[in-house]
Image (cartoon, rainbow, N blue to C red):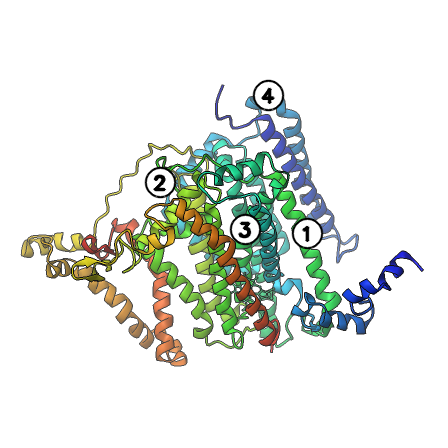
Amino acid sequence: MSVGDYIRNSQIWKSVFRHPAPTDRRNRVVVMLTNFFLHLHPVSAKQQGIALSYTWCMGGITFFLFLVETLTGVLLMFYYRPTLEWAFYDIQALRDVQTLGIMREIHRWGAHAMVITVWLHMYRVFLTGSYKPPREFNWVIGVLLLVLTLLLSFTGYLLPWDQLAIWAITVGSNMARAHPFLGGEGPGFQLLNMGGYDLITNASDAKFLLLGGRFVGEATLNRFYILHCVAVPLVAAGLIAIHFWRVRKDGGISQPL
Amino acid sequence: MNPHPDLTSSVLHGLGWYYLILFTMNLLWTVRSFKVDGEFDKRTPVVGGIPVAAVWAVLSAILLMLSAAHFTGGSDPAKFVIRLPEWFKNPVDAFFADPVVYFAGSVGLFWAMIRFREWWIRESVAWSMLQASLIFMGLSLSDYDFRQIVGKPDNVPIVAMLFIVSFLTWIYFKRAVENDKRIADGRPLVGSDDNDKVLVWPDLVYTELICMVVLTAGLIFWGVALEAPLEEPASSVKTPNPSKAPWYFLGLQEMLVYFDPWLAGVVLPGIILGGLMAIPYIDFNKAGNGYYCFKQRSFAICTFMFGFFPLWIALIVLGTFLRGPNWNFYGIYEVWDVHKVKAANNVNLSEFFWNAPVMSSFFGGLPKGSSVLTILVRESPGIVFIIGYFALLPPILGLTILRKYFVRMGVLRFLVFSNLALWMAILPLKMLLRWTFSLKYIVGIPEWFFNI
Ligand code: HEM
């Protein structure tokens, strides 16, 4: 008996994988049903629906990049403190000192790539008309995922706390100041007042809410850190789960009727 | 010594590698185009008496020599001759350093892409275009200012995106044109004769696995090759010029040139997202679900692509590569000179209206005063224009040229659709008005922060 067979016949191995290797038809079916990760997929599918030339695998690539970002992101969190005192120098140390510093590169390039692949996935879904009934609602969930992907990228941009970061966020968050009704310099904010006092001022408007202050500062860093590392990823993960569920429930990947 | 040399030995080496890669690509392509149906054969395709493969062989040879020249000519970069000449760069900058030409060009390209789809999906044409753009890139990289902006680590993904998007669009049109033909002839779609149910293990799972391995390798390579940027520590007093949003928002930032932040930064993004979500509910066309095609859905495809290419990607490219200090427009080889001034003397619609000779002789020019009524009267031309645009145009269109849609969509759906379409048109419209009449605001009420 070879070592491989010995391992595959051990109690430990069998407790993890409840069936023989997927080398014959029966076990190829069983593996899809018993493995937690594989059960996202159906057991069988139309050949053209799963063809690379049809889906470009773009949704799958986006999901994979999301996982890469999660993994590298958690590793980066071990090295990073979101305070004015440390943020910049912790990132600098990633470049100059830490062995795992390459994680920052992978995290950043992965984020850029994910923005691009989400667009391309949407482009493919549009070109194949896959948003048409019965998949209308999954398209809507997709648009929400697009927003979340951009938000993830945007909130992460601030964390290195260098010149690039704070000015990009300043430019972006200045938009919130101009929010109609809710921004301190937006049209119609004067209409929201009580007994002659404006309810919306630059210390109580949408920009203030976003930044936790009137300018990009320590409170902003904290807010963006929590949004970036906890809040947005959680929501995105939840929506991705629903997105995948719906792909299955709407009849699998679209095909000509 | 020149602090900004166009060429240094490390640049020359980099370009040497670049051309070596192009050479390898073309060598493989030469072999491929020599074969007939994947087999070596005497009946290799010929144009004008010359085998097609010979043309590519010549290109490969030139690229190999270029590469060798870059590797060996590195000792005195200042004297190196293979670079873009000034007589090429200056006119290119002078001509393209203008949002009007740029935008018109991108719309023209978009039109040509659709109009000539049957021509450019041909493999030899597509390959020639790819090679032309790669060689253009390589030559341009010999320019200092081009390298400064295109070589920024954060901008590299954009360049990559341009190539990937073009490639996928090519794939799409290739499939769609073929399917269009088959539909017209009543033949089955591409691949429909080979569409049995297959097991996901191994058919899909293996594809995914290979994808993951390739991507991981790619990301690690990218991470090693290119260091993530880190500038000086944040300082709230030193404002960089230009201050740019992250690259994927530069299309929105470009809209700030034409609209105030409440529109460009809040309302228009909201409409874009709302409009995207509305697509499945307003597209009543049942055809083209689950396969690539063009003719059956030409309106939908053209509209989406118009939004995606000229209005989104082209504006990102513009914002990233062509906007410099003070948000001025710079050519791709132009120095970012902070002192470049561009006189902007834009005029509001209300000023046009009330200061027109006839009006001013009757009413004495622009109404002055800050009461609500005077403001409304002053801005009445713009208000009428906006109401007409969003409230009257849809029913008028629905009863005339878009009658076909109106009948099939019903009132509510048609109104949503036509308003979204009008919102989409508002950016090009405002651009045109700005460029032709130097129009600043259609409705300009700074008193209420309400400018359109
Ligand atoms: C985090 C972002 C996203 C992830 C991880 C994701 C993932 C996926 C995956 C894995 C599929 C299976 C088929 C394929 O790979 O193409 C899929 C299908 C689909 N996605 Fe997404 N997606 C995302 C964003 C979007 C966006 C932005 C849209 C559109 C606005 C969208 C709309 C759809 C639709 C309609 C389908 C069904 C396609 C069909 O049946 O052919 N998704 N998605």
Q: Position of residue A171 (x, y in %)?
A: 37, 46
User: How far apart are labels 2 and 3 at the CA level?
Assistant: 29 Å
User: How far apart are labels 1 and 4 at the CA level?
Assistant: 39 Å
Q: Which mark is residue B274?
A: none
Tell me if residue A227 comes above or below residue B6 in the rendering: below
User: Any atom of ligand 1 within 8 Å of the CB at mark 3?
Assistant: no
Asked which quadrant contains residue A215, the reply is top left
What residue would you read off at disc 3? A111
Q: Earlier in the sequence, mark 2 or mark 4?
A: 4
Front-most of B315 and B233? B233
Are the numbered discs 4 and 3 placed on the same chain, yes or no? no
Kind of residue indicated by mark 2: Asn
What residue would you read off at disc 4? B76
Q: Give the SS element for disc 3.
A: helix
What residue would you read off at disc 2? B328
Q: Is residue B383 left or right of residue A245?
A: left
Q: Give the SS element for disc 4.
A: loop
**Few, some or many residues within 10 Å of mark 3 (<14, 14–19, 20+):** many
Callout 2 touching callout 3 (CB < 8 Å): no
Which residue is painted at 34% across and 68% down in the image?
B419
